[in-house]
């Protein structure tokens, strides 16, 4: 149903094991056998995760029939990062509002009398 | 099963309608009725998407029982953006490799004789 590229990428990333596999592959290509080791997973389970990552274009499998190491393809991660940039002003604004709120509540005690141990600035 | 925060966010973003809702909310808070209009969706369908977004902390619904406008919460998007930063060197490296490859194939004609119309540089 959701076959657009961004949806495929987000869907592939929505699993901690798949993110751990990507983190491992970011350090270099690995065989499926070596990938499976730290996860204590069966080979079919690892293969299933790799298929999801491959479909999303996040990894590439070598054609070599015997070893077929997996390699990270970072382009979809770059695309997601670029997609998120349009919201940067939103999260920066919300931090500005938090700052404003913190300033506000720090100023309040002054109106009702200074807090003990806090110097009056004006 | 996958209830960690990042997985929830990625999962919520893995749908083009939910991303369109977020894009609309990035411009300001909207009632569910107004949100539904451009999507030609039923109210229950929109409500279902809003529930997924709310569970992922990507939106907040006002407590006002009558109107309950939805508002974007950009913090999870910031977290995803920060998560992706660890892969920046990977996608930048792959662009470096592409540059290298392009330089290589542009130099090749020289070895086999200059292309017509292309000046020899050395």
Image (cartoon, coloured by chain):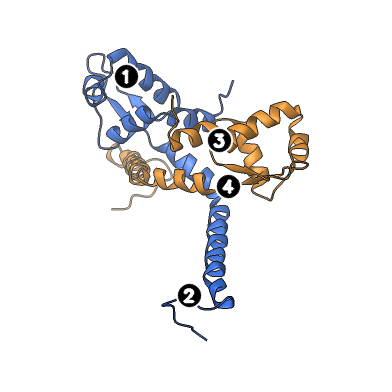
Chain colours: A blue, B orange
The reply to whether discs 4 and 2 touch (Cβ–Cβ < 8 Å) is: no
In the picture, measured across the screen, residue B33 lies left or right of residue B3, that is right
In the picture, measured across the screen, residue A84 lies left or right of residue A33, that is right
Q: Which quarter of the image is occupied by the N terminus of chain B? A: top left
Subunit that carries the residue with mark 4:
B
The reply to whether discs 4 and 1 touch (Cβ–Cβ < 8 Å) is: no
> For the residues carrying marks 3 and 4, which lies nearer the camera in this image?
3
> For the residues carrying marks 2 and 1, which lies nearer the camera in this image?
2
Separation of marks 3 and 2 at Cα, in angstroms: 39 Å
Quarter of the rendering containing residue B93: top left
- Report helix, strand or loop for mark 2: loop
Q: Earlier in the sequence, mark 2 or mark 1?
A: 1
Dot 1 corresponds to which residue? A46
In the picture, measured across the screen, residue A49 lies left or right of residue A68, that is right
Q: Give the class, few, some or many, for how many residues have Cα within 10 Å of label 1's Cα (few <14, many ≥20).
A: many
Dot 4 corresponds to which residue? B73
Seen at 25% across and 25% down, the residue is A35
The image shows residue B46, relative to residue A107, as above or below, that is above
- The answer to whether residue B17 shows anywhere in this view is no
């Amino acid at each position: 149903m959701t076959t657009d590229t961004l949806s495929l990428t987000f869907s592939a990333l929505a699993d901690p094991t798949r993110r751990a596999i990507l983190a491992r592959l970011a350090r270099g290509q690995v065989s499926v056998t070596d990938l499976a080791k730290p996860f204590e997973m069966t080979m079919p389970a690892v293969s299933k995760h790799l298929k999801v990552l491959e479909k999303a274009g996040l990894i590439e499998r070598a054609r070599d029939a015997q070893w077929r190491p997996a390699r990270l393809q970072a382009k979809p991660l770059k695309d997601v990062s670029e997609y998120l940039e349009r919201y940067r002003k939103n999260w920066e604004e919300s931090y500005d509002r938090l700052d404003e709120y913190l300033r506000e509540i720090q100023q309040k005690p002054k109106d009702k009398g200074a807090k003990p141990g806090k110097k009056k600035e004006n």
